[in-house]
Image (cartoon, grey):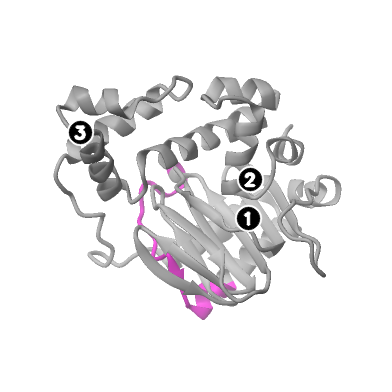
Amino acid sequence: MQYARNMNTHESRCEMHFGREAPECVVALLPGIGERRRYRGVVQPFAAHSHGYYVIGLVEKGRRSLVCNGAAFELVPGDLVVFNPGDAHGCEQSDGGVLAYDSIAVDAELLDGVRLRGPKVSDPAAVEAFREVLRAVEEGTEIQTAEAVLYLCELLAAEEGGDVPLPAGLHEDAAQRAMAHFCGHLASPASLSALAAEEGLSTYALIRAYKRRFAITPMRHLASLRVECACRLLREGVEPAAVAAEVGFADQAHLTRAFKQRLGTTPGAYQRMTGR
């Protein structure tokens, strides 16, 4: 499998913790599905961010305090962590130990907008299905992996009416337009005050409306969108310095900081692990 080859030749030691257990972040492409990510020995917090894809992960070791869409959760070994596209989430270690965590990122198009249960799922059947995905990744074919992922997602699908979208609020349309502007102008300097003025709002009113709609502040969301775009360009072979300019970061160091805060590895290491 592609993943096994990447595991042997493209490991990245993240500068997150200097203790008994060496920190490690390994990323590998899952063709037609998304990515597999493995973290070991991690103590760093992950800044609030969101994705345009699903993330399903299993906590193997350590406890983490998670905030997702404004609600707090305590993650313990054996918990599945499930994020739908757009879920705003961040976490930090809560037990003085280190985190060991395996996850898969699943392209949104693969599930046609299905909502999954989350963000914390304690379900033995789903945990076993997730482990079956990892076995298929490491030992099976791409088709077996795809089937295992789809079965896992079926188990995690939210019951009808059991998962409610974030509540609409005042100036929600303005927040939607701001997000659309970000998506269409990633490389341009962002001026919240200008966007707010166009909407006839104060900057603070737009920030509040945006956070109410997306559960994340505008600038953090913009950084998250830029990192996601950077991942695509890095996979295509664009040099990190050029990527930084193309997606709107001030320089490569700025890209690296934002990248590590959200993915736990550097742009260069990510490119070596996922480049073709």
Q: Residues within 10 Å of mark 3 (few under 14, many from 20)?
A: some
Secondary element at tag 3? loop
From the viewer's side, name the closer residue of 130 and 42: 42
Q: Are marks 3 and 2 in contact (CB under 8 Å)?
A: no
**Cα separation between marks 3 and 2:** 32 Å
Which x, y percent locates residue 131?
A: 63, 69
Whole-Å distance between the Cαs marked 3 and 1?
49 Å
Q: Report which quarter residue 237 is drawn in.
A: top right
Q: Amino acid at mark 1?
A: Thr
Report the residue marked by disc 1.
145
Which residue does the image show at 51% across and 51% down from the upper left?
47
Residue 111 belongs to the span the image colors magenta: yes
Q: Name the residue carrying label 3.
A: 202
The amino acid sitting under disc 2 is Lys
Which is closer to the viewer, label 3 or label 1? 3
Assign a secondary structure to mark 1. helix
Q: Which residues are magenta?
A: 109-128
**Residue 188 placed where, x, y %?**
44, 19
Q: Amino acid at mark 3?
A: Ser
In this figure, which residue is indicated by the disc labeled 2? 260
| Residue under the image location 53 percent in, 37 percent down | 228
Residue 270 visible in the shown view: yes
Q: Is residue 186 above or below residue 211?
A: above
First in sequence: mark 2 vs mark 1: 1
Q: Quadrant of residue 121?
A: bottom left
Which tag, 3 or 1, sits closer to the chain's start? Answer: 1
Mark 3 or mark 2: which comes first in sequence? 3
Q: Is residue 34 visible?
A: no
